[in-house]
Image (cartoon, grey):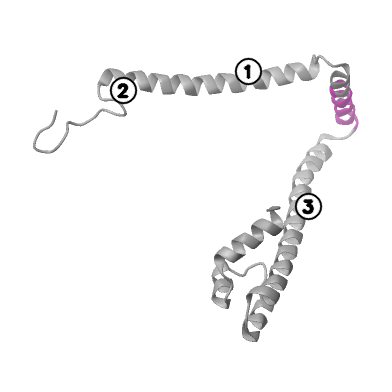
Amino acid sequence: NGGKNGPSPEFGIARTPFHDMYQQYLLRWAFLQRQIEYWMDWYERRKNLVLGSTFSTQTIAVVALSAFFIVAWIVPTRFLVLAWLYSFFWEGWAQGTLMRKNNHTFMKAFKDTAASVWLQNSASNVKAETWGPTTTIDEMIDSGVQLLVMRDWIQTDFYEG
């Protein structure tokens, strides 16, 4: 069970090649099972959309599919592809606008709280007024804001306690 260099080497997780092989087969089976479940679920959802048990779901799917085919028949394909690509850019632009708005809202609330509660001297307050979306946490800490106090404030004000 050992020698000069310590215990004998192990083959993997298990101590014997048989157990190691058995565990490898179990891992392979678990991976295969996840893949099978994923594709069965995918197929079941598509089947239920067209042959759904509720009439409203089936009707909406058939109407949407029919509308798509009619639009594809009337409108040239290049315009449909351009509209589809444009939708991705529009979604990204809208999400970016929302993120910038949230960033500015957070920084305004953070600067107001830091200036009124946490920062003690006027030099730090003046420095806090220059903080923006690209300000690092290290700069804020160097101005006198404590990291744990900042964490607690973010949790209570933005994550409801």
**In the image, residue 46 above or below residue 150:** above
**Quarter location, residue 136:** bottom right
Q: Which residue is mark 1?
A: 40
Looking at the rendered structure, the secondary structure element under dot 1 is: helix
Dot 3 surroundings within 10 Å: few (below 14), some, or many (20 or more)? few
Disc tally is: 3
Between the C-alphas of marks 2 and 1, the distance is: 30 Å
Which dot, 2 or 1, sits closer to the camera?
A: 2
Horizontal arrangement in the rendering, residue 101 relative to residue 27 (left or right): right
Mark 2 or mark 1: which comes first in sequence? 2
Mark 1 or mark 3: which comes first in sequence? 1
Q: Which residue is mark 3?
A: 94
The region drawn magenta spans 61-74
Q: Provide residue 61's location: percent of width, then percent of height.
A: 84, 23
Q: Which residue is mark 2?
A: 20
Specify the amino acid type for callout 3. Answer: Ala
**In the image, residue 86 above or below residue 127:** above
Between the C-alphas of marks 1 and 3, the distance is: 35 Å
**In the image, residue 44 above or below residue 119:** above
